[in-house]
Image (spheres, rainbow, N blue to C red):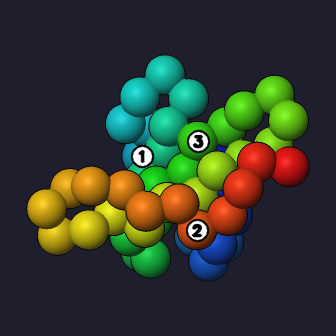
Amino acid sequence: MTCPVCGSREVGKVGAKNYYCHDCCVEFALHPKGMMVYEVNADGTLIALNGVG
């Protein structure tokens, strides 16, 4: 699996369909209609960077 943002292969699985890139520090989730990309805040909350589709 490669990161959809930076193309890195330093990606780990953090949930059933959720992944985390260790190079650019984003989390992304796979959905049937597309992919959601999230920025991870210092407090652990997620901010959506795009919509599904």
- Residue at 67 percent across and 37 percent down: it is 30
Q: Is residue 43 left or right of residue 48?
A: left
Mark closest to the chain's N terminus, 3 or 2: 3
Percent x, y for residue 17?
56, 29
Q: CA distance from mark 1 to mark 2?
A: 19 Å
Percent x, y for residue 50?
67, 64
Q: Which mark is residue 3?
A: none
> In this picture, is 26 found above or below 16?
below
- Residue at 37 percent across and 36 percent down: it is 14
Q: Which residue is mark 3?
A: 29
- Residue at 13 percent across and 62 percent down: it is 43
Q: Which residue is mark 1?
A: 12
Q: Amino acid at mark 1?
A: Gly
Determine whether the residue tagged by mark 1 lies in a helix, strand or loop: strand
Does residue 11 appear anywhere in the picture?
no
Q: CA distance from mark 3 to mark 1?
A: 12 Å
Q: Which residue is mark 2?
A: 49
Q: Nearer the viewer, mark 1 or mark 2?
A: 2
Does residue 43 appear anywhere in the picture?
yes
